[in-house]
Image (cartoon, rainbow, N blue to C red):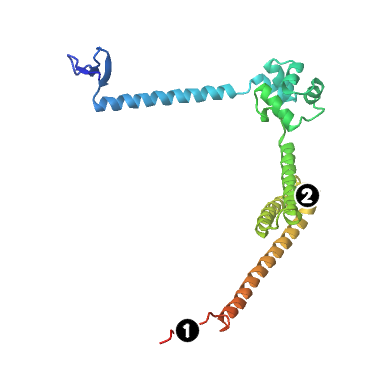
Amino acid sequence: MTQATARRSKNPSSEPQTICGSDGEPLYTLVPVAEYARLKRAAEEIADVKASSNAILGELADLIPAEVVHRIADGEIPVRVWRQHRGFKGVELARAAGISPAYLSEIETGKKDGTFRTMTAIAHCLTVSLDDLAPMMDDSERSVREQAARINGIRAQIRHIENLIVGEEDFNTGAVRQAAATLAADAQLMVDEAQGSVQTPEEAKDWLAPILTGVEEILGLIDRAEGDIFETARSTREDLERVVSLSTFRAPRPEKAAS
């Protein structure tokens, strides 16, 4: 076992005590508790400063260059702007993204919208997010797209309810009730917002009301079905109670033992 020796400074007020090993090399340094606490706080403050500096540097690295911002704001297609900013040739980016140069050219000229998979691959090659490749929109265009997305969401909810009712899965009244209630809330919200709004397409206004009527009918039928189930269960229990209360159903009493 290695023996340790303590070596104290001639001036204990200026240097802490050091514990050395058998070879004379320092192993431990003893410091007062107050000094240890001060050193610990200082180390934590330094770590916080480093973390803040790294965060700031990361944010600065994520900033979009002014040249890119101005070109996209002027109407240029973001894919082309970012490709040129990264120093890619069209053929190089197309090859890296797994698409043809002709297809990339159509995307960069606005003739075609890239599929989600294609745009994801391009964004990965350019080390940018999908949002960075989206063209800039004014407020009216953004509002129209948001409304279209919400309408598509309602259509998807309707298809989901249809699958729950006529699909191959086992019929579940609870699942239908939950889906119908969600659809009712979303459709009613759009109806409320559509009052006096020119942003909601007229065809959407025309079929939102019938959807709410249909959902109300669905919920009513679910209530009736579940009510019938409860009524059937209650009446069945009463019938069962009558059966088990009959003297003929009861177990015979044990015979008395012969004396």
Q: Which residue is depicted at the point 63% across and 74% down? A: 236
In the rendered image, the quadrant that contains the C terminus is bottom left
The mark nearer the N terminus, 1 or 2, is 2
Secondary structure under tag 2 reads helix
Secondary structure under tag 1 reads loop
Residue topped by disc 2: 204
* Identity of the residue furthest to the bottom in this view: 259
Q: Does the image show residue 61?
A: yes
Point out the frontmost of discs 1 and 2: 1
| Callout 1 crowding tier (Cα within 10 Å): few <14, some 14–19, many ≥20 | few
Residue topped by disc 1: 255
Q: From the viewer's perspective, is residue 64 above or below residue 220?
A: above
- In the rendered image, residue 155, in percent from the top left (x then y), is placed at 75, 48
- Residue 256 is drawn in which quadrant? bottom left
- In the rendered image, residue 84, in percent from the top left (x then y), is placed at 71, 17
**For the residues marked 1 and 2, what is the alpha-carbon distance in whole angstroms?**
80 Å
Q: Does the image show residue 196?
A: no
Question: Mark 2 belongs to which amino acid?
Answer: Ala
